[in-house]
Amino acid sequence: MEVSALQHARYRYQPQFPGVLSQELTTIALSPGAPTESIADQTDLKALFKHTYGTPLITVVSGTGKRNETLGRQLTLGVILSGGQAPGGHNVIAGLYDGLKRGNPRSRLYGLLGGPSGLIESKSRELTDAVIDAYRNTGGFDMIGSGRTKIETPEQFAASLATAKKLRLDAVLIIGGDDSNTNAALLAEYFLNQGSPIQVIGCPKTIDGDLKNEHIQISFGFDTAVKTYSELIGNIARDANSAKKYWHFIKLMGRSASHIALECALKTHPNVCFISEEVAVKKWSLSQVVDQICASVLKRWENKEPFGVVLIPEGLVEFIPEMKRLILELNDTLAAYEGELAALPNWTEHLAFLGTRLSPTARELLESLPPTIARELLMDRDPHGNVQVSRIETEKLLMGMVEKRLSRLKQQGLYTGKFSALGHFFGYEGRAAFPSNFDANYGYSLGLTAFVLIASGLTGYMACVKNLAAPAEAWIPGGVPLTMMMHLEQRHGAKKPVIQKALVDLAAAPFKAFAAVRDTWACTTGFLFPGGIQYFGPAELCDKPPQILELEQQGSI
């Protein structure tokens, strides 16, 4: 297969990793902490996870001189990539493979193909030197593919165990986000319930950055994604400052949390950036959101700068209280009148039909929306009949409403400018990029750490690496019990164990740093242009961690 010059160069990159993992494996030990509890619903979760609840936090340390023979035993492992792509996933597998072969050259690694369905349907390939070497330090999940299948029915759990036994696996590593790692916890518990010694370890993956807590400081893939988006935002900002006639509305991935938008704002200094969590706490209406953009447009027009950049988290509309209520009403009404709606010939009649069945407030809001957005709300639904919020073109919604508001202000003599807007959505552009040095190092370190946890006989844990704002040599590997991060959520009519998503903390240093300067950004042109990801050069240019990590751990930008 033909490869690019950069790919050739990246094959030769040697990831950096914690110093403790560079020593002779048989001298590595585990240091357990105190027993743990879940973040909530302790009694119920302890009953659900009888075998794996309450296990201690683990730190990987240098041994005391006594040989740790468990890390040298022959093992057969399986690995699964679950959910959407995130840069660094191939390096997790490479780290796992290298640790496995360092421990015992006779050990074997199987990739389960297409995500969790590979375990259910017994589809796998053995991963060899040739396979691993072809994917080192590259983006994507194409080594073994990924998928979003959940292991949730008794038949699926039984089939998973059958596949693991067929391949004679000692353990399975599941690389995924909060839902995938919840699945890992359930699978670990199921195997033990069935009397099977097969272990299950998880690994934190998501570009959204919402798999995060005091022990999981960030998920791999986030750094590469935000650097990719920030390059594009910087390019657009420079174009805007050159042409001086367009406002660019840029929607960024991140439905449940705004970590991506916050990090990109810190890297590029847009004129306006919304943080969904703040919108929810302050209960801003859609009109108030539009007001903030218009205030920047008016001030910048007065300053003879009729251009700007607005960053919008993907899930913003769900955090605006009135929009959230409208979506909930629509979901209920669409489900209740599914048959009647299916018989109507077009969306205009859908709108008229629903209008008489919504509350007056919801109906008024729906009718105030641009027709294209109203159409998306009514016609684009998921298999359960719910509105597909992630597909709502929020950037176009806000562009249309700002234009309408400015037109009204112009009629009142309060605005004399011209407003031209362009919309963008950055998401898939960052999911499979060549991983940054940080993500290449972090993914590789997580893979090595996962091997140590597995070889040490642990199950029901997530591999973790701490102290990530420091150089890789000083990173601290360990393991976090999956049940420690759980609570119960109402899903599909029943309470289910779920790893809690981490939203942007409005009291933490990253948001405070942003809030301290955004009013200045709104009125002035102070864009930053971070440029493309740098792979070669001084560490301060190539190896920097995400800015929110530096702020959280050091308290300054």
Image (tube, grey):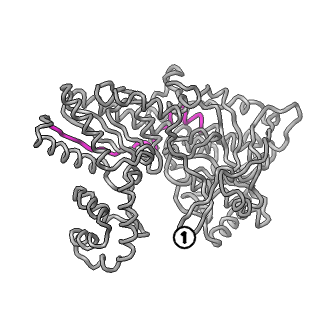
| Of the pair 483 and 382, the residue shown nearer to us | 483
Taking depth in this image into account, of 367 and 191 the one nearest to the observer is 367
In the image, is residue 14 part of the stretch drawn in magenta? no
Residue 445 or 405: which is nearer the viewer? 405
User: What amino acid type should be assigned to the residue bearing mark 1?
Assistant: Gly
Instruction: Return the x and y of residue 530 as percentages of the image width and height.
Output: 40, 27
Residue 48 placement, left or right of 182: right
Query: Which region of the structure is painted magenta?
Result: 418-442
Q: Is residue 203 visible?
A: yes
Q: Which residue is mark 1?
A: 493
Q: Quadrant of residue 408?
A: top left
Of 396 and 114, nearer the camera is: 396
Residue occupying the point 73% across, 31% down: 20
Q: Is residue 72 left or right of residue 283?
A: right
Locate residue 112, reporting x and y percent. 61, 57
Q: In this rendering, is residue 420 above or below 159?
A: above
The residue shown at (29%, 34%) is: 236
In the rendered image, the vertical position of residue 35 relative to residue 382, given as above or below: above
Residue 314 can be seen, yes or no: no
Rendered view: 191 above or below 315: below
Disc 1 is placed on an element classified as loop
Task: Report which quarter residue 116 is drawn in.
Answer: bottom right
User: Where's residue 89, x and y in %?
Assistant: 56, 44
Tell me where residue 334 appears, x and y as whole percent.
36, 71
For the image, the number of numbered tags is 1
Q: Residues within 10 Å of mark 1 (few under 14, many from 20)?
A: few
414 lies left or right of 254 = left
**14 to 313, vertically: above or below:** above
Residue at (31, 79) in percent of width and height: 340
